[in-house]
Amino acid sequence: TTIHRLPESAFREIDTRGWVYTFDRDYHPERLCLAGWGFLAEIRFEPGLRGRLWTCRTDLERFAGVFENFFRVLVAYRVMQSGGVLLHSAAFARDGRAQVVFGRSGAGKSTSSRFALNAGWEVLSDDMNALLPDPWQVEKLPFAGDLGQTPSRSRAYPIAGLRWLQQAAAHAVRPMSGTLALARLLVCAPVVNEDPFRVDGLLHNLTNLLGHASAETLDFARDPGFLSLLDPDH
């Protein structure tokens, strides 16, 4: 991966009032082109995954934000090529195994992670986690949401379960069909899930994951009581 500097005049000025930040993606068989606020990037897939980033950001805080956005995309493809998935999720571990909680924005991933942390669980991330095979485990990455980075004894744990998180009046764990689980996992696999040239590989990885880890719906009432459903021995 290489990083290049461009002058600010190379980029359009953007009025960010009321703006929900995203970036443009242009998918091709051999590469992915990205354009965002103050940066351009290209990721090439052959003869090996590699990236180039152009930015006008020179101050540390803004450059860090640009690089993290680019790095997340690069990691998503690296994990996919390794047979896994980068999942928009929370993951917290106890007794050597991790629960992976995934869902839409606002479902409660950071809130549930905070409850787990306060109850003595290790939180790998409340935002983004790598799920990798052979055997399937969740691996900690330097990506965090509202909770920030938290310490953990290990960087990787076997997956105890996959839980689709949704808010409800009372806690419950309910079965979920394989088809629905596949669709919900796909929704939470950013960038790659919209890549028409590589989404089939992602679906293959997710199908393999569901063959090795159970997926259920977790109704979440926004209090710590849900933890007893995930770990009834504590």
Image (spheres, helix red, strand yellow):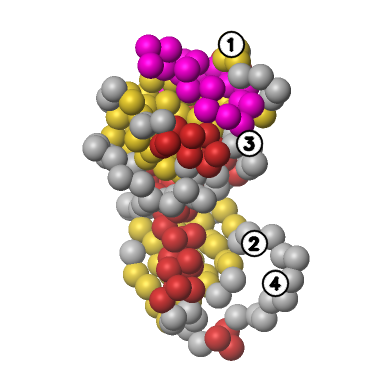
Label 3 crowding class (10 Å Cα cut-off): few <14, some 14-19, many 20+? some
Magenta-tinted stretch:
207-234
Task: Kindly identify which numbered label has been placed on residue 21.
Answer: 2
Residue denoted by label 4 = 16
- The crowd level at tag 4 (other Cα within 10 Å; few <14, some 14-19, many 20+) is few
Which element type, helix, strand or loop, lies under badge 3? loop
- Seen at 58% across and 67% down, the residue is 36
The reply to whether dot 2 and dot 1 touch (C-beta < 8 Å) is no
* 228 to the left or right of 50: right
How many angstroms separate mark 3 from mark 2 (CA)?
Answer: 20 Å
Report the disc number at residue 175. Answer: 1
Q: In which quarter of the image is the N terminus?
A: bottom left
Q: What distance separates the C-alpha of mark 4 from that of mark 1?
A: 42 Å
Could you tell me if the residues under marks 4 and 2 are in contact, i.e. CB atoms within 8 Å?
yes
- Upstream in sequence: badge 1 or badge 3: 3
Seen from this angle, which residue lies furthest left? 153
Q: Is residue 184 visible?
A: no
Q: Determine whether 62 is above or below 191 in the image.
A: below
The residue at 65%/80% (across/down) is 12
For badge 2, the amino acid type reads Tyr
Which residue carries the number 3 mark? Answer: 107
Q: Look at label 1 and name its amino acid.
A: Pro
For marks 3 and 2 on the same chain, the one whose residue lies earlier in the sequence = 2
Q: Which of marks 3 and 4 is nearer the N terminus?
A: 4
Farthest residue, direction right: 18
